[in-house]
């Protein structure tokens, strides 16, 4: 492997996202014991991570204009996103009907999809993910007429649909805050995943990383502010942060966010500046990106469990 380029073996380290996300869901379960099994949270975190990664790949050309859209990769991730969203639908239907997942029959599932608003929203998200997967596959065959901006819009709308119609929709401006929180977190995570997947050389990291660093800071601020407001509204006060499973998960998520803020401050000194000056190889940049993505995945796991916690 040439110095300054990223090898396939290093890219496989991105699979650390999977155990990191599961760790977040498992930690949330420990904080809510004796709560229900975390299976619904697992499905949700895989859907959230896959959707955010699709969003990041679609947005990457705006961050790095010379980056070619990775249509095959985008289509594959969108397919995984579609499968995970179907699993989320199954768990939501079982919860609404009030039966274990194994006892959910086709008739009750169809009723959930056609007569319950949560099911209808889930279908819309599922169809959007499937459309993105199909468009990505078609664009891989005919890239000359393809537009990543179209994928960006479809994906952003799909990622915002569930937060807009969730519990925060009952509060003033709650839907807006929830949607902004979800999209800011997805962009923050997804862009870094996209860079790890698509940025190959020292020079490309020198171009893309400073731009990502510049947008990451305001994204973190938005995630923190909207998360605090949403969380306090949901738990109803500071005391409930320690007395309820939901509050404890929220505290753990806040702790991970503080870790990420510290990591970001350290990276700006030891990673962003050397990479921008072409003093750091692509492999070293990739390792740092994977480390941060893994920590983010833990936060995504906590957030997914938070979303399915009553």
Image (tube, grey):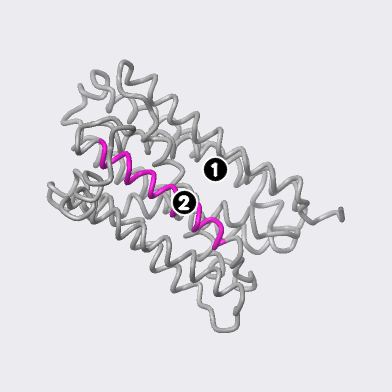
In front: 289, or 162?
A: 162
Q: Quadrant of the C terminus?
A: top left
The dot on residue 240 is none
On the rendered structure, is 299 left or right of 213? left
- Residue furthest right as drawn: 2
Based on the picture, tell me whether residue 90 belongs to the magenta stretch: yes
Find disc 1 in the rendering and name its residue: 264
At label 1, counting other C-alpha atoms closer than 10 Å, the crowd grade (few under 14, some 14-19, many 20 or more) is: some
Residue at horizontal 29%, vertical 30%? 100
Q: Position of residue 28 (x, y in %)?
A: 39, 26
Secondary structure beneath label 2: helix
Residue 300 is inside the magenta segment: no
Above or below — where is 35 with respect to 272? above
How far across and down, in percent of the image, does residue 205 sit? 68, 58
Name the residue nearer the viewer: 285 or 124: 124
Residue visible at 53% across and 68% down in the picture: 136
222 or 102: nearer the viewer: 102
Q: Marks 2 and 1: in contact by CB < 8 Å?
A: yes
Position in image of residue 226 (x %, y %): 29, 46
Q: Main secondary structure of the magenta part?
A: helix
Query: Which comes sooner in the sequence, label 1 or label 2?
Result: 2
Q: According to the image, label 2 marks what residue?
A: 217
**Residue 306, relative to residue 273: is it above or below?**
above
Between the residue at mark 1 and the residue at mark 2, the CA separation in whole angstroms equals 8 Å
Mark 2 Cα-neighbour bin, 10 Å: few <14, some 14–19, many ≥20: some
Question: Which is more toward the observer, 277 or 73?
Answer: 73
Q: Position of residue 228 (x, y in %)?
A: 29, 39
- Give the quadrant of residue 254: top left
Residues shaded magenta: 74-94
């Amino acid at each position: 492997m040439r110095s300054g380029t990223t090898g396939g073996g290093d890219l496989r380290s991105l699979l650390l996202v999977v155990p990191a996300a599961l760790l977040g869901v498992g930690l949330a379960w420990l904080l809510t014991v004796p709560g229900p099994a975390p299976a619904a949270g697992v499905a949700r975190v895989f859907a959230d991570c896959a959707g955010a990664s699709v969003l990041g790949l679609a947005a990457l050309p705006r961050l790095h204009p010379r980056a070619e859209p990775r249509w095959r990769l985008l289509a594959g991730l969108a397919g995984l996103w579609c499968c995970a969203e179907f699993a989320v639908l199954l768990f939501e239907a079982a919860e609404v009907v009030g039966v274990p997942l194994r006892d959910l029959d086709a008739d009750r599932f169809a009723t959930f999809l056609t007569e319950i608003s949560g099911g209808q929203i889930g279908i819309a998200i599922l169809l959007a993910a499937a459309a993105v997967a199909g468009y990505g596959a078609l664009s891989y065959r005919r890239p000359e007429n393809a537009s990543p901006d179209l994928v960006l819009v479809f994906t952003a709308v799909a990622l915002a649909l569930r937060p807009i119609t969730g519990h925060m929709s009952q509060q003033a401006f709650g839907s807006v805050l929830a949607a902004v929180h979800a999209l800011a977190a997805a962009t923050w995570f997804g862009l870094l995943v996209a860079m790890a997947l698509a940025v190959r050389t020292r020079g490309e990291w020198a171009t893309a990383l400073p731009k990502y660093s510049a947008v990451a800071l305001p994204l973190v601020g938005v995630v923190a502010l909207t998360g605090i407001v949403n969380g306090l509204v949901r738990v109803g006060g500071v005391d409930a942060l320690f007395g309820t499973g939901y509050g404890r998960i929220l505290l753990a998520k806040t702790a991970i966010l503080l870790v990420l803020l510290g990591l970001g401050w350290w990276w700006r000194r030891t990673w962003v500046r050397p990479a921008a000056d072409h003093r750091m190889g692509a492999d070293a940049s990739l390792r740092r990106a994977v480390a941060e993505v893994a920590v983010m995945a833990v936060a995504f796991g906590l957030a997914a469990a938070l979303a399915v916690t009553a």
